[in-house]
């Protein structure tokens, strides 16, 4: 027995040594390959040389042998691609040499990254500054419960590597900003915008124009989605279509309006498909056209969009927008909306005397002060969860339903021993609509109305940790 144990020990040590040696060789090969790539690009134009030197690293060969043939296990892995006459070995070779940057590892980015990893893209970059949250999992299918609280990029990259260990996955665990976007985007052949906010959308489009990269752009909200390929084969950039950002009120986010989980799944799959078509030059990419998907009626429409605009301030003939301008450009100010929904600006509409904190409100409830708690969220929000004893009149219907408030106030006063009229406290989800409601109530003569600062989100954080956050 002792002899067998010793033998096993020797084998394990030997294996470890060989693995370390292989790692070392792989790393040397990668260095030489990037040097080779840089020197061959230097033979071309000077501007391209810097970019190639900083190109996304790839695994040696990416499954192709030095003679450009596929190794046996790669033939086995990609056989269904190779069998496609219009795709074949050439398509697979182009895929294996491509580098694609996926910005956002959320609802759209999940299927994009999964498919691009599985299909054998040479180098896949993933950018995301957020951590995985439980409320992501119904649509962000690349993440698993075990990763809740951990970085989305790490979670997504781990899943991609589990699916295909032959590709290179590069993690960027930070939010894309004008100060870092050029350096990251420069390393990739094409970019997939899988983000969900307006300032980032403008920023990515501008960056892709400056660096001359095709951009596969997708969006999903509620039951609808859309996608197109910007800045490719004469198609417009985002600014050609929308030179000025829409009013703030017209911008919705999944965190406010909701989204059916599979809708970004559908759009993300189509983004992966367009990315593959662009890098392999197979088929007709969605350039100059936009696909509109309506999940409820199961309808897909494709509309023609305008060509790139000669007077576009970014991609137009006389554009003077430089990389320096880009790095200084304030996209949040330009669109009047934040890059992260973690930093949705809170309004400050009321004097201090018309506002109370959640903790102060809780104290007056404990003291038995007669009052009325008015919840101004939409009715379907109120059904998700509410504070006991609150009454719901959505902000949109407040003015026409003031009589309900009057009746309830009278009942509250009759039930209490005091002859002082009860106060009205107003709450909403995050503390913005409640301020608007208090303004309306003050105008209509309900002068005792007060706003509960920070809404139910603060209530859950400061008073009742069991109150559900959605
Ligand atoms: Zn443009």
Image (cartoon, rainbow, N blue to C red):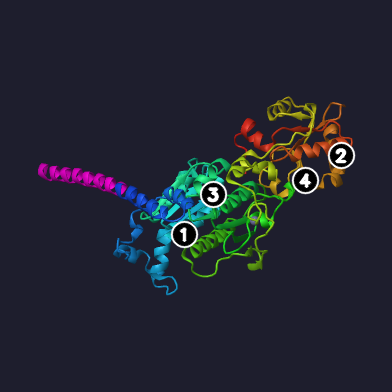
**Residue depth check, mark 2 versus mark 1: number of the one nearer the observer:** 1
Q: Where residue 59 appears, x then y in whole percent?
A: 36, 53
Label 3 sits on a secondary structure element that is loop
- Distance of label 4 from label 2 (alpha carbons): 15 Å
Mark 2 to mark 1: distance in Å? 58 Å
Q: In which quarter of the image is residue 421?
A: top right
Q: In which quarter of the image is residue 462?
A: top right
Left/right placement of residue 415 relative to residue 253 reads: right
Q: Residue at x 33, y 54 (%)?
A: 60
Q: Which mark is residue 104?
A: 3
Instruction: For the C terminus, give its image quadrant.
Output: top right
> What is the magenta range?
1-27
Instruction: Please tell me whether residue 209 belongs to the stretch shown in magenta.
Output: no
Could you tell me which residue is drawn at 62 percent across and 40 percent down? Answer: 328
The residue drawn where x is 61% and y is 56% is 219
Compare marks 3 and 2 and give the one earlier in the sequence. Answer: 3
Relative to 215, is 450 above or below? above
Label 4 lies in ligand 1 vicinity (Cβ under 8 Å):
no
Q: Mark 4 points at which residue?
A: 394
Indicate whether 93 appears above or below 313: below
Q: Circle 1 is placed at which residue position?
A: 115
Label 3 crowd bin: few (<14), some (14–19), many (20+), radius 10 Å = many
Q: Which residue lies furthest to the left in this view?
A: 3
User: How far apart, in angstroms, are the residues tagged by discs 1 and 4?
Assistant: 42 Å
């Amino acid at each position: 027995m002792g002899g067998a144990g010793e033998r096993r020990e020797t084998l394990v040590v030997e294996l470890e040594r060989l693995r370390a040696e292989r790692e070392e060789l792989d790393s040397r090969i990668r260095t030489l390959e990037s040097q080779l790539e840089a020197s061959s690009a230097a033979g071309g134009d000077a501007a391209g040389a810097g970019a190639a030197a900083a190109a996304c690293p790839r695994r040696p060969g990416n499954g192709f042998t030095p003679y450009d043939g596929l190794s046996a296990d790669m033939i086995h892995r990609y056989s269904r691609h190779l069998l496609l006459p219009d795709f074949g070995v050439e398509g697979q070779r182009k895929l294996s040499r491509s580098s694609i940057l996926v910005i956002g590892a959320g609802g759209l980015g999940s299927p994009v990254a999964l498919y691009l990893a599985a299909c054998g893209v040479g180098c896949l970059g993933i950018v995301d500054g957020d951590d995985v949250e439980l409320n992501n999992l119904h649509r962000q299918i690349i993440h698993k419960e075990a990763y809740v609280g951990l970085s989305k990029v790490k979670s997504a990259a781990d899943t991609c590597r589990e699916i295909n260990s032959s590709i290179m996955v590069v993690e960027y665990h930070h939010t894309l900003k004008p100060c870092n976007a050029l350096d990251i985007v420069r390393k990739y052949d094409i970019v997939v915008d899988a983000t969900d906010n307006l300032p980032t959308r403008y920023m990515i489009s501008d960056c892709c124009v400056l660096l001359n990269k095709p951009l596969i752009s997708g969006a999903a909200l509620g039951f609808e989605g859309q996608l197109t390929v910007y800045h490719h084969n004469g198609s417009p950039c985002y600014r050609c279509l929308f030179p000025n950002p829409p009013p703030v009120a017209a911008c919705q986010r999944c965190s406010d309006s909701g989204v059916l989980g599979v809708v970004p799944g559908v759009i993300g799959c189509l983004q992966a498909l367009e990315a593959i078509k662009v890098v392999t030059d197979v088929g007709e990419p969605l350039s100059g056209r936009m696909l509109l998907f309506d999940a409820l009626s199961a309808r897909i429409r494709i509309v023609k969009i305008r060509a790139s605009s000669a007077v576009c301030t970014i991609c137009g003939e006389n554009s003077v927008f430089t990389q320096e301008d880009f790095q200084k450009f304030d996209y949040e100010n330009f669109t009047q909306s934040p890059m992260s929904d973690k930093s949705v600006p809170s309004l400050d509409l009321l004097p201090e005397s018309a506002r109370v904190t959640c903790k102060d409100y809780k104290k007056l409830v404990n003291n038995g002060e007669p009052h009325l708690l008015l919840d101004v969220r939409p009715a379907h929000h109120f059904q998700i969860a509410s504070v006991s004893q609150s009454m719901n009149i959505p902000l949109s219907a407040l003015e026409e339903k003031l009589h309900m408030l009057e009746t309830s106030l009278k009942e509250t006063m009759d039930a209490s021993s005091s002859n002082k009229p009860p106060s009205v406290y107003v709450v909403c989800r995050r503390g913005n609509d409640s301020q608007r409601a208090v303004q309306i109530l003050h105008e209509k003569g309900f002068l005792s109305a007060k706003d509960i600062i920070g809404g139910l989100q603060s209530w859950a954080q400061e008073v009742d940790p069991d109150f559900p956050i959605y």
